Image (spheres, rainbow, N blue to C red):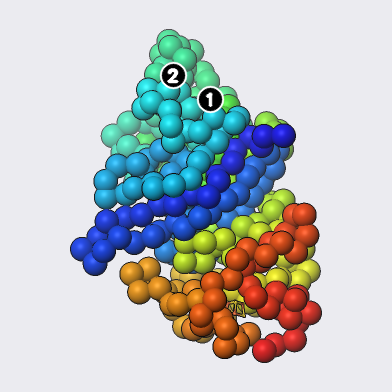
């Protein structure tokens, strides 16, 4: 049974002056209709790069995809022609980004920008497409949509601008919505509202959703399953309840123990000591070993495979049993 979307053993490299950097190193995950997958990790973990590979906005130098597949309804998007892929990207698979302000064009009204989706992709008239824009602004709960459709982006708050971006992303009824840090630039209360909106839209439309975030706090209520990434690999994946009950990787455990703080909006704060590795000078063995409280001698030499814990759960830690049991080191 082929899932709606499957990333399979994906590798992405970037050519840099210091050499080839493996930003994504054998990542696999899948998504069904109506399902929400949260992809969690620090900056540089490869979570955004994986999403960009799905969207096909990566396969130009200096990025290279030496290996892997991105299957949508069983078809590998990486093998499609540019033209065929354009039919999928932005329409059947849509993406929203962190920074709504720079993604919107300041010189056009929001109504014009939303309605453009219908003119370009559905050949609608100006009048009909503007009607659709008002409908969509209602749907993403922008108050007084009819009065505000001719306002410019700067006349809206950050949260309302993100709602406008969400309206554009769902305009063509995508089957998959990828949201890359959709609330990171927003205040905490607004974050919760936008997250709630995404969850509602997802339920109404049965979209599959990939929610990319560094903040484990925002995914608890909306995600069905979680994939935790570290240094270009998935280190743990599991149904969301399993992870909250007992993590099976020390990195996930550290993420859970970190407390998001209201006064450090947008920063990536963790209870985990040390820094994520330099991808040009990756630690030997387990990439997490310099930061890991569970480390044993073999962690420095042996790369942990993604051990199967159950049919729906994996951990790339030699000592996942100890981590699950909660006895440190
Ligand atoms: Fe820590 Fe070793 Fe597990 Fe890596 S394999 S996460 S270093 S215990
Ligand atoms: Mg990112």
> Could you tell me which residue is drawn at 40 percent across and 73 percent down?
282
Q: Quadrant of the N terminus?
A: top right
In the image: residue 238, left or right of residue 300: right
Percent position (x, y) of residue 153? 38, 40
Work out whether residue 187 can be spotted: no
Question: Crowdedness of circle 2 by 10 Å Cα count: few (<14), some, many (20+)?
Answer: few
Percent position (x, y) of residue 145? 53, 31
In the image: residue 62, left or right of residue 223: left
> Could you tell me which residue is drawn at 37 percent across and 22 percent down?
83
Q: Which residue is mark 2?
A: 121
- CB atoms of marks 1 and 2 within 8 Å: yes
Percent position (x, y) of residue 161? 46, 43
> Could you tell me which residue is drawn at 43 percent across and 77 percent down?
283
Judged from the image, the quadrant occupied by ligand 1 is: bottom right
Q: CA distance from mark 1 to mark 2?
A: 8 Å
Q: Quadrant of residue 293?
A: bottom right
Badge 1 marks a residue whose secondary structure is loop
> Could you tell me which residue is drawn at 31 percent across and 39 percent down?
106
């Amino acid at each position: 049974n082929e899932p709606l979307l499957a990333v399979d053993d994906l590798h992405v490299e970037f050519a840099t002056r210091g050499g080839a950097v493996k930003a994504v190193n054998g990542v696999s995950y899948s998504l069904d209709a109506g399902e929400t997958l949260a992809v969690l990790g620090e900056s540089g973990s490869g979570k955004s790069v994986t999403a960009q590979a799905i969207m096909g906005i990566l396969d130009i130098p200096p990025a290279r995809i030496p290996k892997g597949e991105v299957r949508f309804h069983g078809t590998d998007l990486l093998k499609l022609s540019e033209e065929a892929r354009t039919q999928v990207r932005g329409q059947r698979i849509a993406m929203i980004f962190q920074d709504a302000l720079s993604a919107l064009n300041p010189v056009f009204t929001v109504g014009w920008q939303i309605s453009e989706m219908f003119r370009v992709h559905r050949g609608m008239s100006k009048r009909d497409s503007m009607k659709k824009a008002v409908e969509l602004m209602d749907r993403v709960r922008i108050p007084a949509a009819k009065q505000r459709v001719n306002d410019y982006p700067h006349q809206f708050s950050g949260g309302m601008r993100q709602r406008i971006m969400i309206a554009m992303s769902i305009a063509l009824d995508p089957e998959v919505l990828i949201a890359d840090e959709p609330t990171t630039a927003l205040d905490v209360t607004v974050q919760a509202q936008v997250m709630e909106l995404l969850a509602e839209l997802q339920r109404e439309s049965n979209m599959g959703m990939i929610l990319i975030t560094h903040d484990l706090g925002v995914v608890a209520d909306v995600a069905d399953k979680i994939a935790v990434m570290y240094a270009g690999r998935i280190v743990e994946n599991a149904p969301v309840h399993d992870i909250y009950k007992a993590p099976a990787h020390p990195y996930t455990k550290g993420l859970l123990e970190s407390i998001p703080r209201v006064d450090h909006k947008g920063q990536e704060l963790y209870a985990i000591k040390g820094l994520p590795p330099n991808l040009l000078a990756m630690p030997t063995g387990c990439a997490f070993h310099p930061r890991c409280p569970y480390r044993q001698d073999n962690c420095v030499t042996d790369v942990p495979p993604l051990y199967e814990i159950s049919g729906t759960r994996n951990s790339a830690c030699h000592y996942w049993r100890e981590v699950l049991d909660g006895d440190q080191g």
